[in-house]
Amino acid sequence: MLHCSHQIISDRLHDLGYGRVLARWVPHALSPYQMQARVTACQSLLLTPQRKKFLADLVTGDESWVL
């Protein structure tokens, strides 16, 4: 179809800044401190008064989260 090897296409995509992503769930091992930090963050979000811009304060990314 493209008359190129898989490796050439992979190299070009890498040169353009693209990376491989596994399309499956990968378990994360959290420390007790990290688990407690997530629980605390969620509890504070639940206590936040309902506001129009609530979601504007919540930023999410690929397999990670930041408040």
Image (cartoon, helix red, strand yellow):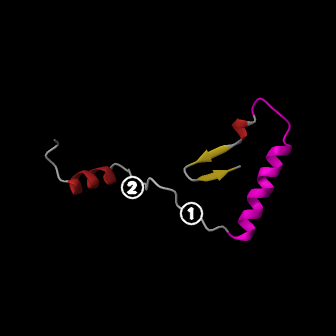
Type of residue at label 1?
A: Pro
Front disc: 2 or 1: 1
Mark sitting on residue 20: 2
Q: Is residue 40 left or right of residue 6?
A: right
Decide which of tag 2 and tag 1 comes sooner along the chain.
2
* Mark 2 neighbour class, 10 Å CA radius: few under 14, some 14 to 19, many 20 or more: few
* Mark 1 neighbour class, 10 Å CA radius: few under 14, some 14 to 19, many 20 or more: few
Q: Nearer the viewer, residue 19 or 63?
A: 63
Residue furthest to the left in view is 3
Q: Is residue 8 above or below residue 46?
A: below
Residue 17 in the image: x percent, y percent? 38, 51
Residue 27 in the image: x percent, y percent? 56, 63
The quadrant holding residue 21 is: bottom left
Q: Is residue 51 above or below residue 8?
A: above
Residue furthest to the bottom in view is 31
- Identify the residue at image location x=84%, y=41%: 48
- Identify the residue at image location x=17%, y=43%: 2
Q: Range of the magenta residues? A: 31-53
Q: Is residue 9 left or right of residue 52?
A: left
Type of residue at label 2?
A: Arg
Q: What is the chief secondary structure element of the magenta stretch?
A: helix
Residue 48: in magenta span:
yes
- Identify the residue at image location x=82%, y=51%: 43
Secondary structure beneath label 2:
loop
Residue 17: in magenta span:
no
Tag 1 residue:
27
Asked whether the residues under the numbered discs 2 and 1 touch, taking CB atoms below 8 Å apart as contact, a structural biologist would say no
Residue 49 in the image: x percent, y percent? 86, 37
Secondary structure beneath label 1:
loop
